Amino acid sequence: MTSKQPKYEYISSAKLPTRMGDFRIHGFVELSGQEHVALSYGTWNEGDVVPIRIHSECLTGDALFSTRCDCGYQLEKAMQNVVDHGFGVILYLRQEGRGIGLLNKIRAYNLQDSGMDTVEANEHLGFDADLRSYDICKLMLETLKVTKVELMTNNPRKLKALDDLGIEIVSRTPIDHGMTKDNKNYLKTKTEKLGHVFDPHLFD
Ligand SMILES: Nc1nc2c(ncn2[C@@H]2O[C@H](COP(=O)(O)OP(=O)(O)OP(=O)(O)O)[C@@H](O)[C@H]2O)c(=O)[nH]1
Ligand SMILES: [Zn+2]
């Protein structure tokens, strides 16, 4: 008899009081050892539409206050949206640098300092523009008893990924928050080359 080993595992949950409100944190691990977390706020019934954000790790933006990208602003806004709504979920995936890792992201930033855009820099280093996987979201959402979502994102790839996993997306909420003079070109490149949906007037 063959038994297929699960690729992801739920580990444990705990209280996580934050500046925005009292969340809970739920830990998950991949077979590779990579660790991920989900944050939940409030309660819901199975079948309710739950606002969620799938956030990819960005140490520089999320923890070090970088204005080079919009990640930190989006994370803060998404957590605040969830609190204002009364319930919701943040899936925090540890796939730094769109999956190339922190040190390669610093290499990519170095190339961007010399004039490349974010996609050219990835390709120059031998990576695709976006190496992320969202497969673990299925176990995370199952564990949190979320079946229908309102997804906070500007990235159509995330909509497709969740749809492919069989999660019902009831609506998408844009999260175009955190444009700075330092990240305007980065956001423009995301729109032109990675398919992100931004209001074009934001770039005027
Ligand atoms: N390789 C690389 N990764 C970057 C760069 N800037 C930000 N990131 C990473 O990009 C990820 C966030 O992806 P984004 O493309 O900004 O946004 P998104 O998550 O796809 O889309 P939204 O849901 O709309 O925010 C994080 O993992 C960041 O670390 C960069 O210049 N190069
Ligand atoms: Zn970032």
Image: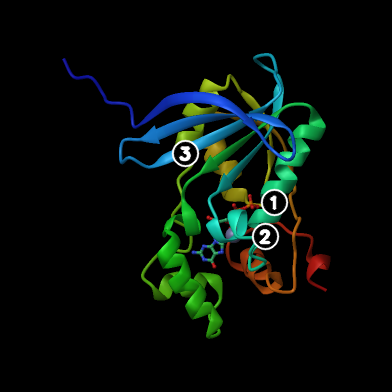
SS assignment at label 3 = strand
Q: What is the three-letter code of the residue carrying label 2?
A: Asp
Give the residue number, with chain letter if any, for mark 1: 74
Q: Which residue corresponds to the image point at 47% horizontal and 66% vertical from the top-left?
A: 105
Q: The residue under label 3 is which amino acid type?
A: His
**Residue at disc 2, CB closer than 8 Å to ligand 1:** yes
Residue 81, horizontal then vertical, whole percent: 77, 39
Q: Give me the residue at 58% from left, 62% from top.
A: 194
Label 1 secondary element: helix
- The residue singled out by tag 2 in the image is 70
Distance in Å between CA atoms under marks 2 and 3: 21 Å
Residue 71 left/right relative to 92: right
Find residue 40 and name its label: none
**From this viewpoint, which residue is outermost toward the left?**
1
How much space separates mark 1 and mark 2, taking CA atoms? Answer: 6 Å
Disc 3 crowd rating (10 Å Cα; few below 14, some 14-19, many 20+) is many
| Quadrant of the snapshot with the N terminus | top left
Q: Quadrant of residue 87?
A: top right
Residue 40 pos. (x, y %): 63, 29
Q: Count numbered badges in the picture.
A: 3
Would you say the residues marked 1 and 2 are in contact, meaning their CB atoms lie under 8 Å apart? yes
Give whichever of discs 1 and 3 has the lower sequence position: 3
- Residue occupying the point 81% across, 66% down: 202
> Is 56 or 79 nearer to us in this picture?
79
Ligand 1 is within 8 Å of the C-beta of the residue at disc 1? yes
Q: Is mark 3 within 8 Å of ligand 1?
A: no
